[in-house]
Image (tube, rainbow, N blue to C red):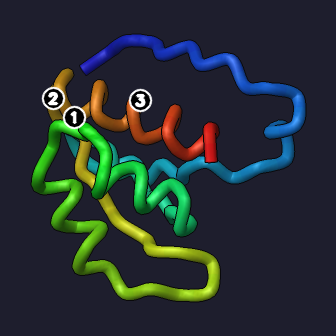
Amino acid sequence: MVGFVNINLPEDNIQRNVLFIVPCTDYFRAVFTFGENAFYEVVSGNFPDKKIKHELLTAKKYKEGRTIYLDVRTKLDLENIIQLIKIKLNN
């Protein structure tokens, strides 16, 4: 999977960790930590991927939020990651 994703960050988000990328053989893993507002937007909103919702609902809650690990192997996986980035940046 080769391609580019361009997401414009607002200036107030310059110093913010949005996600971590872990390279793996033939795919990569995206690691997100969601605070309460972003968590509720994903699980209560119209986010289409039920597996990701389940991962968030079962993730242990810490002071920083809930952390999930998502394997990105397909274009659909990448589209979900982009949607999650946008949700996180808006919260």
Residue under numbered circle 3? 82
- Please name the residue shown 12% across and 55% down the image: 51
Q: Does residue 59 appear left or right of residue 67 in this picture?
A: left
Q: Decide: marks 1, 3 in contact (CB < 8 A)? A: no
Residue 9 coordinates in the image, percent (x, y): 73, 25
Residue under numbered circle 1? 77
The three-letter code of the residue at mark 1 reads: Asp
User: How many neighbours does mark 3 have within 10 angstroms: few (below 14), some (14-19), or many (20 or more)?
Assistant: some
Image quarter where the N terminus lies is top left
- Please name the residue shown 37% across and 87% down the image: 60
Counting residues from the start of the chain, the first of labels 3 and 2 encountered is 2
Could you say which disc has been placed on residue 38 in the image? none
C-alpha span from label 3 to label 2:
13 Å
Label 2 sits on a secondary structure element that is loop
Of the residues tagged 3 and 2, which is closer to the observer? 3
The three-letter code of the residue at mark 2 reads: Thr
Label 3 sits on a secondary structure element that is helix
Residue under numbered circle 2? 74
Q: Nearer the viewer, residue 43 or 16?
A: 43
Counting residues from the start of the chain, the first of labels 1 and 3 encountered is 1
Residue 68 sits above or below residue 64 on the image: above
